[in-house]
Amino acid sequence: MQYKREIRGVIPTPEEMERQLQEAKERREASWERLCHRAEDIRIIDFHVHTFPEKIAERALKQLSEDSGSRPFTGGTVRELRASMQEAGVDLSIALPVVTNPGKVAHINLTAAEQNEHVDETGILSFAGIHPAAENYRVLLRQAKELGIKGIKLHPDYYGIAFDDPRTMKLIDYASELDLIIITHAGTDIGLYPPVCCTVDSIVHVMDTVAPPKLVAAHMGGWNNWDEVLTKLAGRPLWVDTAFSLGEIEWLTPDSAKYGFHQLPDKEFLELVHALGTDRVLFATDSPWAEQKDYVNRISAMPFTEEDKQKIFAGNAKKLLGIIAGG
């Protein structure tokens, strides 16, 4: 009997679990409402960042840095991201989890939901992760929606599954039914070998087949595939983000640059933005792989109108996320 009493103290009853879930939901909703109440004060939103738990951040960044040959600008923790945001004047950052194992999706998304209970304090809003090989993807996406998460991150190269694979398109279609934002890595991944799993053509195929209304193609629509973006995606109803597309790559060694990878020169960046439309571009850095302050300064110095800068820095993201005063 003593053993049973101890177990009851460790494992919550169904009623206790229901109460805890409801309290967590109320905390998330209250935090989001507080964020929305100061919507007018949100001037810069970084739509694409990554963070790692303190205990694995150093090891994870070391491996990713070696794989890509590039140097990160921070240590990749929430603490260092917040310091970077303060220095750069970034008011809100969207953390994008990358899932490599379908069995870890539920845990990753619960962690994201816990982080979002404090978004008004931290300025960090986490999206959900997902994996097209997860047979229960519909359950996982419904759970993400019920947890109040605003969108999902896809990284086809880490899955080894094409963006227009039938499994991915089914997932995208259902996520769209749930009114979730879908952001995907697009183009080459600097740290992974070919083939490219999210080509510009695959984005076109998905848009023509599934027509997701809230699709964001990261890295200006396709990293190092920008000529195709200009000719095939301009005028289409999708968003792109500016993540890891500007400035100079911090190579670990001169040999790291041997594949000819590069960022967009300012002139080509401007041409691409105007072709896609300034109401379709989201400010983003890919922190820790780019420096937030540097990106803010670079785009601020470009010959956009003040209205277009406001759209790129925060206005477009606010509309997509539903950040409205009193919302």
Image (cartoon, helix red, strand yellow):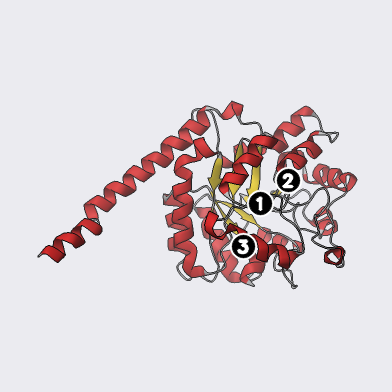
Under circle 3, the secondary element is helix
Under circle 1, the secondary element is strand
What type is the residue that disc 1 sits on?
Val
Residue 256 in the image: x percent, y percent? 82, 65
Residue 309 lies, with reference to residue 270, above or below; the image says above
- Give the residue number, with chain letter if any, for mark 3: 60
- Give the residue number, with chain letter if any, for mark 2: 291
Could you tell whether 64 is left or right of 152 in the image? right
- The reply to whether discs 1 and 2 touch (Cβ–Cβ < 8 Å) is no
Mark number for residue 261?
A: none
| Residue found 64% across the figure and 45% down from its top | 47
What type is the residue that disc 2 sits on?
Glu
Could you tell whether 29 is left or right of 57 in the image? left
Mark 1 packing: few (<14 Cα in 10 Å), some, or many (20+)?
Answer: many
> From mark 1 to mark 3, how far is it between C-alphas?
26 Å
Q: Earlier in the sequence, mark 1 or mark 3?
A: 3
Mark 3 packing: few (<14 Cα in 10 Å), some, or many (20+)?
Answer: some
Q: Is residue 191 visible?
A: no
Q: Earlier in the sequence, mark 1 or mark 2?
A: 1
What type is the residue that disc 3 sits on?
Ala
- Give the residue number, with chain letter if any, for mark 1: 216
> From mark 1 to mark 2, how far is it between C-alphas?
21 Å
- The reply to whether discs 1 and 3 touch (Cβ–Cβ < 8 Å) is no
| Residue found 65% across the figure and 31% down from its top | 43
Which of the two residues, 95 or 186, is positioned nearer the viewer here? 95
Q: Quadrant of the N terminus?
A: bottom left
Residue 235 lies, with reference to residue 315, above or below; the image says below
Residue 307 in the image: x percent, y percent? 75, 29
